[in-house]
Every structure is written in C-alpha cells, then in structure tokens.
Amino acid sequence: MKRIIAIVRPEKMEPLKDALFAADVSGMTIAQVMGCGNQHGWSEYFRGTEVLLNMVPKVQFALVVNDDAVDGLIDLICDTAATGEVGDGKVFVSPVEEVIRIRTRERGEDAV
C-alpha cells in the first residue's frame, strides 16, 4: 500500500475530489493548508508598510491505495490539478506499513 499526498490549488479541490470519486477511490482526507515554494507569495500594503505574504493557501489530499493504483491516480491528479502555472502543487508518494480500521480491527487492504 502507498500513501499519496497531493497539495493543490484551492480552486482545484472540487474537480479533483469529483475525479477521485469517479475513479473509485474509497476514501480521502482533505485539509486546508498553507505553504510556500516556487510561488513565493505576494506583497501587500498594511497601513502604508509593504508586507510580504509568503504563505499561500493550498488544499492537501491524503489517500491510501493499493500499489497497483498509484500510477493511474498520479496521472489523474496531475491532469486534474494542472493549470500550467507556478504553484500548481506537488504529489508525494510513500509506503504504508499497516492500516487498521478502528471499529472492526481489520488490517491491511481490508481496512482501506
């Protein structure tokens, strides 16, 4: 099993969520996050003083999926979230050693 973390633009949340459900993803966690990277934020003026706002709002999707689904989901995420501009986001993939469903104590793929 693998965990996919995708950090995308806020306006891509609904289209990506719909695309993942259409791809039969059984569940996901979505969180509003702040971050900085190549986008570097922007400048605003507050009471006549320039303030650099370098934390940009993003949306983070977290999925745990079977190994054979990873490549297809990465393609889906990239196709859905891409605008072609700096700040489209990142996808991180990492191994998952174990999953346990709390209610039933099922383990592994049965718990996903």
Image (cartoon, grey):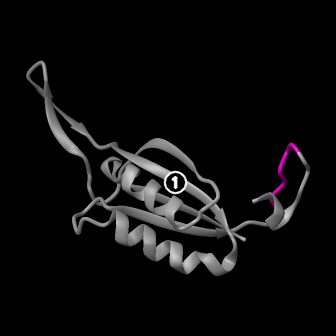
Percent coordinates x, y for residue 86 in the rendering: 24, 63
Q: Where is 5 relative to 47, above or below?
A: below
Front residue of 57 and 14: 14
The residue under the point 64% across, 58% down is: 26
Callout 1 crowding tier (Cα within 10 Å): few <14, some 14–19, many ≥20: some
Number of callouts: 1
Front residue of 9 and 105: 105
Left or right of 58 on screen, residue 43 = left
**Residue 100 is inside the magenta segment:** yes
Outermost residue, right side: 105
Q: Quadrant of residue 112?
A: bottom right
Q: Amino acid at mark 1?
A: Phe
Q: Where is 55 relative to 80, above or below?
A: above
Percent coordinates x, y for residue 50 in the rendering: 13, 32
Residue highlighted by disc 1: 61
Outermost residue, top side: 47
The dominant secondary structure in magenta is loop
Q: Quadrant of the N terminus?
A: bottom right
**Residue 33 is inside the magenta segment:** no
The residue under the point 37% across, 56% down is: 15
Left or right of 68 on screen, residue 56 = left
The residue under the point 38% across, 47% down is: 58
Q: Quadrant of residue 79?
A: bottom left
Front residue of 86 and 61: 61
The magenta segment:
99-103
Percent coordinates x, y for residue 4 in the rendering: 58, 64
- Helix, strand or loop at disc 1? strand
Q: Where is 3 relative to 71, above or below?
A: above
Outermost residue, left side: 48
Q: Quadrant of residue 95?
A: bottom right
